[in-house]
Amino acid sequence: MDEHELPGRQALADEVVGAATAAAEGLIVDLVGPHGSGRTSLLRTLRARLAASGDTLVLAVNGAVYSRPADADDLGRQVEEFLVDLVEGVGVEEATAPVARRRAEVAAGAAAGVDEVPTRRMLSAAGVVDDLRTVAAGRRPVVLVDNTSMMPDQLQTEAHRVFSRLISRCAAVVVVARTTGAPPPPDWIGPTRRWSVPPLSAAEVRLLAAARPVAPDERTCRAVLRWSGGHLAAVTAALDLAERRPELPADELLRQPIPVRSVTATLGGCGALERTVVEVGAVMREFTVSDLIAVVAVLDETPPDDLAVLLGRTPFLVPGRSPDTHSFLPFFRDQVPRDLRAARAGDRDSTRFDEINRAVLRHYRERLRQTLEDPSKAYASWEQLERSDTQRLLLSLVHHGGLVDDARYARFTLASVFFDFLWWWAWYVDAPFLTTLLRAWRSSARGPADEAFVRQLERFRRAYVPAHRDAADPADVRSARWTGAVAALTDIRRALDLNGRSAPERHLVGITTAMLGDARRRLDPRVDADYRAARDAFHRNAVAAAEPGEQKVEDDAWCDPWMAFRQADLARERDQVALAQDLAAAALDATASPRIDDDDRDFEVVANLHRVLGDAVVEKKPVLAFREYLRAVFAAYAFHAGPQPDEYTRTFHREQVDAVMTRLRALAERDRARAVAVCEEIVGWRLGAGAGDLAELLDRRCWDELECLLFPREPRPEEFEVESEYAARVRTVRELLGPRLLPAVPVKRGIFGARRRTPAEAAPETPSIAGLKDSAVEPTRFAPDGDERWPRWWKDELVPQEWQLELDDGAPLTADMSRQLREAVAGLPPLRRRVLELRDVKGWTRTAVSLELDISDDDQLIMLHRARAAVRRALDRHLTGGGPA
Amino acid sequence: MNPIRDHVSCEDFVESVTAYWEDRLTGPARDRFEEHYLVCPPCRSYAGQLRLTTSLLARLEDDGARPGPEPADSAPPEPDDQIRAGPHVPAFTFLDAGAVAPFAGVPWPRPDGSVAGGWVEGGADPWRGTGGVSACRPADLPYWVNDELWRVELDGVVHTGARKVVARRGRLVARVAGWDAAARTAFVDSCLDALRRALVDLADRRHPEDLAGLLVLPVEQVVPAIDRLGPATQLTAAEREVRGYLEDAVAYRELLPTVAFVCAVGCETASPGGGNAERRRQASWFAEHLDLG
């Protein structure tokens, strides 16, 4: 017996069908009813009745099939899918046709090892309507849309467009079903009628209870009806199993596998649930009963009350089975409502939610791990797991892991999932995935969950070492894994942005740093032979990081300096100059001590410490401070010259140089004579491109050029390995810089990464210099940043003017033009002029110029850009007759 | 936050020209740079002046006697290489009048009757900078809209970006005949209409009775009509911005890429997500009105 067979429902169906048949101009029927009121069944009735009423073409779409898109690309695909479903759904009886098709596609894709369903042809709304008109051949289209509110907003807009055209061009009837709480459809065009679908009355429930063997009592029956449609089917599938195997005790029953195929077969029309089962099933191949319950429970965006009802009153509570013998059920039945109440009452720190989350997630993880490791399963080896499969699965776990809508718990869950999977599947964790996780995490509040997070990390740490001791992956897989791990951990370190000084956060830095160090070490072919030693060293470090109070190991060289750096930096911010100096100097002594092998030295923290030391004294003793800054640049250089020169180390080196230049600019504003003195001293060390008229460059504010003269450029890849002339020069200067030890260059290994400092944090902003600065075009020619419509676009009256220039191809330049150009070039600062002459006048290649002038490609680009812009400005003045130039 | 800030500003553009020429802009940054180049005539002229400057400098050394840059290799069309279904990937490209590539400034070899034009070869590393030949999928068309629309064939590995595809080499197959002066006008009108509708929808919630008439006016009269509405219809800041974009779009209606861009920005200002929706609408306009099949 279905809901619509109840007398009240029958009348409602009659009324709707009558109105739809009578509407000559087309009609929108808006069916509004709460969960469990039987909207879906009503739609089914309407479909049968309207199809039977003569000249109609019935189309059915289920909004639940179209989940929320993650980005614009997804949205495009959603819209396409929707339009295709509309067209392909023509004439079919069941709204589940798209679901069946997609299921077949997923199965075919999995069989062929393809991770994406094939891309479909591009469709437009107009094209669909035309297609439909052709197919309808004069009949009247009736579109039934269930679960409208589950469609993404943009998709609703697209659907709206199609439906409006259908109504206006074919006098179609569109029936939209939604829950009471869902927002009304966007401004549909056309006549609209709305019916409320009332909740089932007690009498109706009794009627149904009598008709349904699955419902042993009224309470259960009501609970089941709440989850009518697909949910009911899912639960029924589980129940069928229970009835087939009555000898099983309840907890055994929960562990019984249900083939995915049988689950999906009963889930027709319940899009989101069915899709997730297919996705999870693609990896797991089978489901247990408790998996099913968990999926049903967490998938629905369910109000907590309803969730409690579902979990507490599933049909497993059949008479004759004692609920008390059952471990899973009481947990949900008793704890969940209590915790929900507690959470609502403001007790936000209830740890029971963590347990719930963990229980569900642990279960999944265990199952996934077993599946992956069992060679008899479909994925015989790890390599066969498609990257996108795994990520999709991970993300859906992350998504579903949050049972409650509380950012803090979400944060915890995300972190726990992330770290668990990191060590199983390090090479699957890429930047977008991390970004998703970390954004959610960082948006959340700080509090007790942080402690829980650190506990989780420690668990991870414990698991980390033993797991890899037994790693039997082929070498290339291992290498890929560690490359992924290094990238992931570097991202974490950056994203954490750890300003906090709480104990859990310090631990977090320690552990992440240790993991990063370890991962980098493993990637280095030179230490591969010494794998065991490296691993043991890592393990000691990790122990020391997590338990700082406990016994320290001798070579615990990385944790303390980082703490000291943060404390010194804090002291400096608070103007406790002496304390900052003491802390930084002591940490430097420990870190830069000759006792430590260069291989183990953390040049990143050394650079940071030198910079703090410089910052502490820069007001009073600028020359001294700049010696420290120079050491910081050196250490950054050594860091970058380590075994893993990558974008991170490159950026770090760049940032150190920038930080020093920013401070030099500030000093130049304050005290020109001192700045010149500082520059002369640095040039005396002969690190950079050579001598020049420093005072002139300072006065003209040619900062890029100064930088080239003062500091060593970024090392070139080939200089990392061989004993180059450049390295020898840098080493000589090192001795000049004493007394504190500085690293030999190039070094063999740099291990650690550091959080990036934002520019604002790195140095106080220099006072702005009026006029051109180093811009290609005067900033005054652009609209201000606060402009309403065109911020920083050209002001209308100041756009570039047409040049009055007659040019014959190949003809020599006129004497006047030649003179203009030469004057413009001669007016450039020396290094800029050299770059421009070689590149543009003589036509040298980029590489040749970099080698000739001994500057980096980046510097060359900046020089060339500035020089060209300056020459253009000069020509502009000349060729536009002194207009705005 | 005004959505225009998501795009490259002129002030950013003039600082990136050299980096673009040196192939130091890649991926989305390159796309955004090229988008700005297309939509902003003053910046086009700035870049032209900068290029002229470098060519003048090159002639300084030896007063014009030095040969220019070596011409790009372009293999002559193979005699039996007819247009036919084959392994080449079909796509589209918008070109300046005369089949000139808008960024490189060089003309593509045109097809001769049913024989496709000669291959335009990219460098060894197609995805990086100027190394490859760029083309559009149908959905990308609105971002690169220009005077002439051509069917192209791509060969070799085709890299797909967010707004374009890039291949090792490509050649022109045929001009899309439907993209003529009338179609261009119709396209511009559809963009202006969309922006007008976005503006009216935005303002509609507060005073529908004043604004209903705006939908039927010729589009260039809409802004004056709004301005005549009087103090009772005080515009909000957002409405004022969209009104301004509409005014700009009407003023730039001769400049295809600019008007399409301004309308998208205006729609985004009117409602978040409206810009992308407008770009999709523009894409579907092409699909509906031109034979792209």
Image (cartoon, coloured by chain):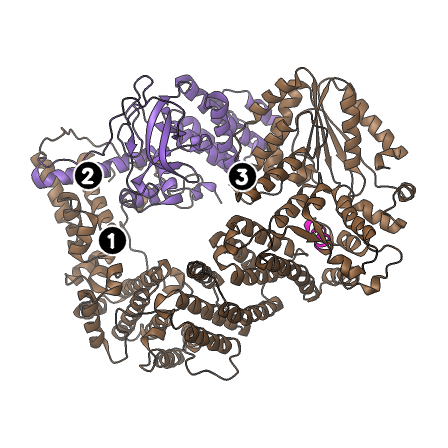
Chain colours: A brown, B purple
Q: Are marks 1 and 2 on the same chain?
A: no
Q: Residue furthest top?
A: A138
Report, in whole angstroms, how far the alpha carbon at label 3 lies from the one at label 1. 40 Å
Q: Are discs 1 and 2 less than 8 Å apart at CB? A: no
Amino acid carrying mark 1 in the image: Asp
Depth check, front residue: B278 or A602: A602
Residue B180 shown in magenta: no
Q: Residue at x 52, y 71 (%)?
A: A466
Label 2 with label 3: CB-CB less than 8 Å: no
Pointer 3 residue:
B273
Q: Nearer the viewer, residue A407 or A146?
A: A146
**Disc 2 or 3, which lies upstream in sequence?**
2
Residue B239 in view, yes or no: no
Residue A377 is situated, as x and y percent measured from the top left of the image, at: 60, 53
The residue segment tinted magenta is: A291-299
Provide the residue designation for mark 1: A857
Q: Give the mark toward the camera: 1 or 2.
A: 1
Label 2 and label 3: CA atoms lie apart by 41 Å
Label 2, residues with CA under 10 Å away: few <14, some 14-19, many ≥20:
many
> Alpha carbon of mark 1 to alpha carbon of mark 2: how far?
22 Å
